[in-house]
Image (cartoon, rainbow, N blue to C red):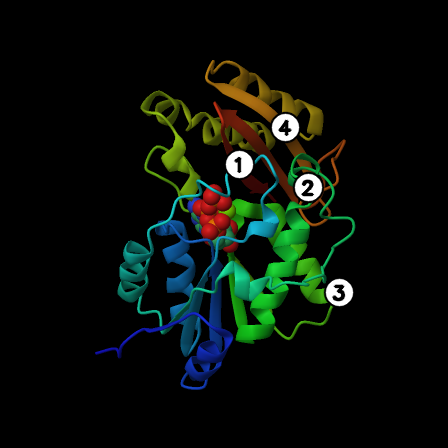
Amino acid sequence: MSRQMILVTTLEELKAGLALLEHPLGFVPTMGYLHDGHVSLARRAREECKAVAVSIFVNPTQFGPNEDLAKYPRDLERDLRLLEEADVDLVWTPTPEDMYPQGYQTWVDVAEVSLPLEGAQRPGHFRGVTTVVTKLFNAVQPTRAYFGQKDAQQAAVIRRMTRDLNFPVEILVCPIVREPDGLAMSSRNVYLSPEQRRAAPVLHRSLLAAQAAYQNGERGAEKLRQTMKSILDAEPLAQVQYVSCADSETLQELDHVTGKTLLSMAVFFGKTRLIDNVLLS
Ligand SMILES: Nc1ncnc2c1ncn2[C@@H]1O[C@H](COP(=O)(O)OP(=O)(O)OP(=O)(O)O)[C@@H](O)[C@H]1O
Ligand SMILES: [Mg+2]
């Protein structure tokens, strides 16, 4: 029998709640509207730590002015039920006013690895992410923090930040959880129309095709990008924003694949932007 999950909002409540938890403490930052991807992170933390804390915060500073902050999906009741089932000990739901009070002016910026790919398409996005993750880490002081490989560049940026700033936290990156047809789970998948939803597994298919080419000996990065691009272009509902074959740590585009490599992409279905990736090694 597990005890009651602790639900806190203010920093003071958080502090009191954390005082009741054992260490090592595992921490999973989320924006809510949870799915099996999030739950997989909480379960992994459960296996590896004595206590598990999850934050739910739709962080305004990581959304661009023309992005979906206002309509970002929310369902706190359902989220809490899922987290209780995953045996989470504490859930923190800070408010934007508490996180960014009047006069807020301090930012954390990871210079290089934040720039390409998602950073190029979403200016300021990673500054918002690294700033909020810093604030969350400082407030929760976890032993380990769990992130998803679905946001591969985010994981690389946070690893870099953690090393560069000596954060005393271990970063764990967990595999992408997919729907049965291969679509990577994402809170934003609910935006898809039925037709778009049927077409969306093309991201994963294009990644698998490039991965297969790699496994058959292809090492030309442009060839691998073209393999993904041509499959995506064959889907009329998909609008490719970028396809990438890059070093998995620096995210710099490659000419030839030698070391650890990330194939990744961002694709629009109407106004909905989906990302996906696979690691080659
Ligand atoms: N399909 C997935 N598999 C594994 N981890 C995931 C998956 N989707 C998201 N995560 C991870 O969950 C954490 C919280 O992500 P977030 O709350 O932004 O969810 P999301 O599904 O990515 O939502 P959105 O697509 O709207 O950004 C991040 O570390 C993210 O990488
Ligand atoms: Mg996300």
**Spatial distance from mark 2 to mark 1, Cα to Cα?**
13 Å
Helix, strand or loop for disc 2: helix
Q: Are marks 1 and 4 in contact (CB under 8 Å)?
A: no
Residue 271 in view (yes/no) = yes
Locate the N terminus by quadrant. Answer: bottom left
At horizontal 44% and vertical 40% (from top left) the residue drawn is 71
- Under mark 1, the amino acid is Ile
Locate the C terminus by quadrant. Answer: top right
Helix, strand or loop for disc 4: strand
Front residue of this view, candidates 155 and 71: 71
At horizontal 63% and vertical 65% (from top left) the residue drawn is 134
Residue picked out by circle 3 = 164
Is residue 41 toward the left or the right of residue 173 in the image?
left
- Under mark 3, the amino acid is Asp
Is residue 195 toward the left or the right of residue 128 in the image?
left
**Spatial distance from mark 3 to mark 1, Cα to Cα?**
27 Å
Name the spot of residue 99 as percent of width and height, x first: 56, 64
Residue picked out by circle 4 = 242
* Residue at the front extreme of this rendering: 102
Q: Which is more N-terminal, label 1 or label 2?
A: 2
**Spatial distance from mark 1 to mark 4, Cα to Cα?**
10 Å
Residue picked out by circle 1 = 275
- Mark nearest the camera among 2 and 3 is 2
Residue picked out by circle 2 = 119
- Under mark 4, the amino acid is Tyr
**Spatial distance from mark 2 to mark 3, Cα to Cα?**
19 Å
Name the spot of residue 111 as percent of width and height, x first: 78, 52
**Spatial distance from mark 3 to mark 4, Cα to Cα?**
28 Å
Residue 63 position (above or below residue 25): above
Task: Tell me: is circle 1 under 8 Å from ligand 1.
Answer: yes
